[in-house]
Amino acid sequence: MSFQLLLRPVLPGPFVVHAVRLPSSRPPTAVKAFVWQ
């Protein structure tokens, strides 16, 4: 659900970049949970 990430522009740039740096092998759900934390 990338739209949820777009709805949270308040997150700092580095935080989003760190989530993107996560290995692509992991499901997007793990990335979403990481960003939500």
Image (spheres, rainbow, N blue to C red):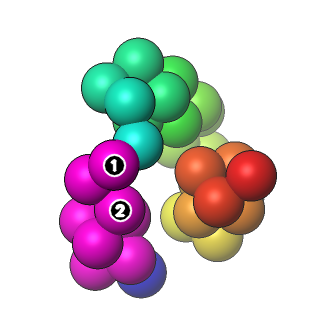
* Mark number, residue 2: none
Q: Secondary structure at mark 2?
A: loop
In the figure, 32 relative to 2: above or below? above
Residue 24, horizontal then vertical, whole percent: 51, 42
* Mark number, residue 10: 1
Name the residue tied to disc 2.
Answer: 8
Relative to residue 3, is residue 35 drawn left or right? right
In this rendering, the count of numbered labels is: 2
Q: Amino acid under label 1?
A: Val
In the figure, 36 relative to 18: above or below? below
Q: Is residue 36 visible?
A: yes
Closest to the observer: 15 or 29?
Answer: 15
Query: Which stretch appears magenta?
Result: 3-10
Q: Given contact means CB atoms under 8 Å apart, are the residues at marks 2 and 1 in contact?
A: yes
Residue 28 quadrant: bottom right
Q: Amino acid under label 2?
A: Arg
